[in-house]
Image (spheres, helix red, strand yellow):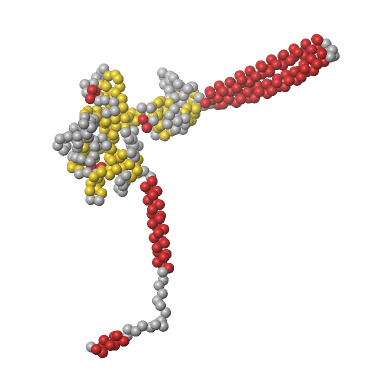
Amino acid sequence: MTRTGSADLSGLTIDRDAPPPTSNRKPLAIALAAVVVVAAALAVTLGVVRGKPAEVRVARAEPVGGAPGSVSSEVLTASGYVVARQRASVSTEVAGRLETLSVSEGSRVAKGQVLGVLRNQDQAAAVAAASAALHAAVAAEAEANASAREISLRLARTKELLGRALVSQAEFDAVDAQDAVARARVTSASAEVESARSRLHAARLDYEKTFIRAPFAGAVLRKEAEVGEIVSPIPSSGGLTRGAIVTMANLATLEVEVDVNEGYVARVHEGMRADIALDAYPTDRYPGHARQIVPTADRQKATVQVKVAFDSLDARVLPEMGAKVSFLADPETPTQGGGASTATAVSVPASAVREREGRAVVYVVDGGRAMARGVAPRPLGPDRVMIGSGLAAGELVVIEGPQDLADKARVRVR
């Protein structure tokens, strides 16, 4: 055993003449630089992404009362149709044959965009003739001015010679009369120029009337005429002429018109909160409010029309869609002592609740940002949950948006 240990220790020798071991640090430096570049690129990318608002869809938190499942926020329900507040049948100012139609159903147009053109060769020729007449009138005016200046100079010389008794009074009077005639011709030529300019303006207006333009920005709903048909501001009773070429609407002004029984109209007031459900998408809710109560009733139906505006719109909402409107009770007012309103449970779509770091949260849209709030949801129907605290009735919650939506992230309601 002793010899074995001695042999082992004798092998542990230090070679002091050997060169020190070298460490290759170049690959390590390259790897660290690559990590820094990737991190910087990732930071820039995240900064760009965070700078762009995320598109979200929202729903309004509805108050509920009593036991779960007993929704008491609906004051009244009515049915109606989606209509555009700004809608027009676009016609022409003059009668003529439609030569060009540049839009079709669904076309999006800007204000002043040409929708169609009537046959306008006659109007174009009138513009050319009026332009030529104006040029001739301007030339005649220039000629009259030159002639008047020549006679004016002759009159000045004749007056000087008359003072020196080199011409007779009769010769001076003749030149003076010619000067008066020349000045009158200048006035007449100037008037003719103004008249020609007015005729050119009128011809251009007639030519412009053959172009049918969009009165506002919107979408074309229907084509009312085809190329080759005769259109007129006043359609004929026999159907030989059309009164319009397209029907268009401003889709940014869509709202719902509902008929409320006059026995219940007292429950509704302007500005009242409402939820809109389209027949085409019955599970989706659109927040809105009563914009106007029409101040007249329908005698035959015993109803009053109420116009409900959308608080947020998307491309799925189209004119003439059927809709059901639920008018919601106003939130409770603060107490006289200045305290907060009585806490009321609210219901929201189940899709509004998300799990973040092991807890349930909802994102409330406030000031263009999504604010995360911790909640304790309880089931309330097949697709809704009840939240007892942490959320107030009437607040807008995100029901559809990016999965990685962060607290206080900038959002845009879709």
The image quadrant that residue 220 belongs to is: top left
As drawn, 383 above or below 319 = below
| Residue sitting at x 43%, y 23% | 243
Q: Residue furthest left?
A: 67
41 or 56, which is in the foreground? 41
Quadrant occupied by the C terminus: top left
Q: Position of residue 121 (x, y in %)?
A: 55, 26
Q: Is residue 24 left or right of residue 145?
A: left
As drawn, 107 above or below 2 = above
Q: Residue furthest front?
A: 337
Q: Residue furthest right?
A: 166
The image quadrant that residue 17 belongs to is: bottom left
Q: Is residue 165 left or right of residue 227?
A: right
Visible residue check, residue 228: no
239 or 8, which is in the foreground? 8
Q: Position of residue 141 (x, y in %)?
A: 68, 21
Quadrant occupied by the N terminus: bottom left
Visible residue check, residue 380: yes
Q: Is residue 378 left or right of residue 56?
A: left
Q: Position of residue 408 (x, y in %)?
A: 32, 44
| Residue sitting at x 40%, y 76% | 21
Q: Position of residue 108 (x, y in %)?
A: 42, 34
64 or 209, which is in the foreground? 64
| Residue sitting at x 35%, y 28% | 84
